[in-house]
Image (cartoon, grey):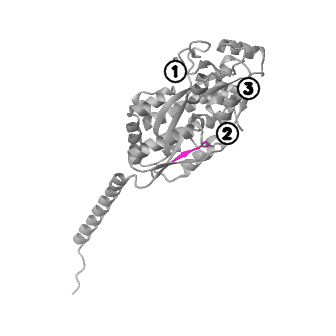
Amino acid sequence: MRHLPTPFSLRRALCASFAVAALSAFALPAAHAQSYPNKPIKFVVPFSAGSATDNVGRILAQAMGEAMGQPITVENKAGANGILGAEVVKAAPADGYTFLVTTSTTQAANVHLYRKLPYDPVKDFDGVFRFPDTPLVLMVRNNHPAKDIAGLIDYAKKNPDKVFISNAGVGSSSHLIAALVASSAGVKVTMVPYKGAGPALIDVIGGQVDGIFDQTNTALPQIKEGKVRPLVVTSKVRLPQLKDVPTLNETTMPGFEASTWYGIYAPKGTPKMAVDKVQNAYLKVMKDKAFTGKMAEQAIQMLPADQYTGDALSKHTESEVTRWRAVAARSGLSLD
């Protein structure tokens, strides 16, 4: 004779099933955490190979890959001022295997340069970690009549629209900071965009344009070889590598400070354990004095330890979005 289960036995069986399911649900993330990463990780750079951002991405990929025990590949998705690469990461699975290596251009400036930006730099990404900041140097061709920043501003006022300042591309840090300085100084200059900082700097050396704001890591070799003449740096205080070059803060623009900053972001919703592991691998690399020493030689500025975290990067991104809103409004910057 077949016995039907009693209500009590049914209830006990259901409870047991729910318990197993609950334990499995908790076990899966734990198992994933232990095995992550179990395949190569991808860093998407939204600019071309050879760019400053690309160099940062490749340096980090090599150092962090060793720390994480999995190779990290770098994929360049250049185009539309970094928009294409940012879109790729926004649409990628939030599984901890795709990250965006980018700058203030995509994460702070673009939102004010394009009326219909297809991503939100704050809402569509999670901050993972921040890279040290890189100040810029204003350099002019060797035969330019201006001997200092005050002289260049005076020259620009007497020759409106006849001062030609090159940059790495429309919307790049070199473009935006040049526009900010020109606006703050009350002068009109002609911005000359190039496809990258390399050719933009070459034309300063060749005398085709008057000057450029370029990052210290690429500017220092040209300055040391006497190919260009530095007038001023954008850091708050003087740089040890350019101790004879004054800051804008101490000369014509008290309180001025600007740098190119880099951040690594994940698609929104990426598991915290993945973000934490990537962040911890980076923090381990940043404790390597040989690694940080090479950056310091290029006048890349180290930050307080608590500023490297993902939370700090997310807060910094929000504040920079606000900051560049004011810059774009005051300078009349728009790309569409």
Residues shaded magenta: 43-48
Q: Is residue 197 left or right of residue 132?
A: right
* Mark 3 residue element: loop
Give 108 or 211, whichever is nearer the viewer: 211
Query: Do residues under tags 3 and 2 come within 8 Å of each other at their CB atoms?
Result: no
Q: CA distance from mark 3 to mark 1?
A: 25 Å
Q: Residue at x 31, y 57 (%)?
A: 27
Residue bearing mark 3? 209
Q: Residues within 10 Å of mark 1 (few under 14, many from 20)?
A: some
Q: Earlier in the sequence, mark 1 or mark 2?
A: 2
Q: Which mark is residue 115?
A: 2
Q: Earlier in the sequence, mark 3 or mark 2?
A: 2
Whether residue 201 is visible: yes
Q: Which mark is residue 152?
A: none
Q: Nearer the viewer, mark 1 or mark 2?
A: 1
The amino acid type, in three-letter code, at marker 3 is Val
| Residue 27 to residue 132: above or below | below
* Mark 1 residue element: helix
Q: Residues within 10 Å of mark 3 (few under 14, many from 20)?
A: many
Residue bearing mark 1? 241
Q: Residue at x 44, y 29 (%)?
A: 293
Please state the horizontal and vertical placement of residue 254, each as a whole percent of the image: 57, 14
Q: CA distance from mark 3 to mark 2?
A: 31 Å
Give 260 or 69, whichever is nearer the viewer: 69
Give 20 or 209, whichever is nearer the viewer: 209
The amino acid type, in three-letter code, at marker 1 is Gln
Q: Nearer the viewer, mark 3 or mark 2?
A: 3
